[in-house]
Image: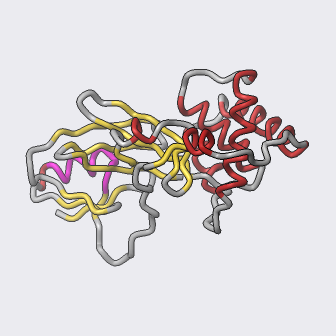
Amino acid sequence: MRLKLTEPVHAVMIDTDLVFLDIDADAYFCLPLPQGLARLDGERLETPDPVLGKELVAAGLAQADPMREPPMRRPPPAPPSRTARRLLERAEGGDVRLRVAHLKALAAAVRAALSSRKRTFRQLIAAHTHEAAHGAVDMDRLLSDLAIWRRLAPWLPLDGVCLFRSGMLAAFLRALGHRPTWVFGVRTWPFQAHCWLQVEDVALDDEAERLCAFAPILGA
């Protein structure tokens, strides 16, 4: 049975566990399956079990796939292999002066943080995706601006929720012209969801060694 993920749903296979993320419901669903019962290829899902297929359709996670349209979604990036913190520690000197642009970006980040408490998960993702770009990355400037953020972060109203912290940093970097990818990942047994910012193979707000345990399910 050939299926296609519905518009708000993203998915990833971890061994034989099929994990769904519904951005409208702001909810994850983990479905442990026997070997060979489902195969996921991007947004397309195949299963030899018609009962499973009908249940996924009834749950709103999938729909019939006519195979007439090409895949529309950009796959999430692979987990990062480098950590920005270590790159900053190895950098010699560099221009890390606090500028007016940084203060304006900080104000934008605070406004984004305050408004995020009133926004749905879909609205948060849409706002970030709308401003995404795919040009050349100025890694030196990005690391310089990130160093300013790390200097200011101890004084900011950050809480322990990764969605809030990453969203605030994303707004700061967007205001400075950077376009990081907001990555959402999951792991199973035990199940855990996490998010972080990434540019190319560099994790901006977490450690690459920790993030390799997560399978990306969505990249915005």
User: Residue sitting at 70 percent across and 22 percent down?
Assistant: 154
Given residues 51 and 115, the one toward you in this image is: 115
**Colour scheme of the picture:** secondary structure
Q: Is residue 90 left or right of residue 47?
A: right
- Where does residue 209 sit, x and y in percent of width and height? 40, 39
User: Residue sitting at 52 percent across and 50 percent down?
Assistant: 202
- The total of numbered circles placed on residues is 0
Q: Quadrant of residue 84?
A: top right
- Where does residue 169 sit, x and y in percent of width and height? 66, 38
- Where does residue 7 sit, x and y in percent of width and height? 44, 56
Is residue 157 positioned above or below 199 on the image? above
- Residue that protrudes farthest toward the right in the picture: 100
User: Residue sitting at 52 percent across and 45 percent down?
Assistant: 203
Q: Is residue 77 left or right of residue 180?
A: left
Q: Quadrant of the N terminus?
A: bottom left
Q: Quadrant of residue 147?
A: top right
- Residue that protrudes farthest toward the bottom in the picture: 68
Given residues 135 and 114, the one toward you in this image is: 135
Residue 68 falls within the magenta-colored stretch: no
Given residues 118 and 190, the one toward you in this image is: 190
Q: Which residues are magenta?
A: 52-62
Q: Is residue 51 left or right of residue 164?
A: left
- Where does residue 64 sit, x and y in percent of width and height? 28, 63
Q: Quadrant of residue 187?
A: top left
Magenta span: predominant SS is helix
Given residues 147 and 101, the one toward you in this image is: 147
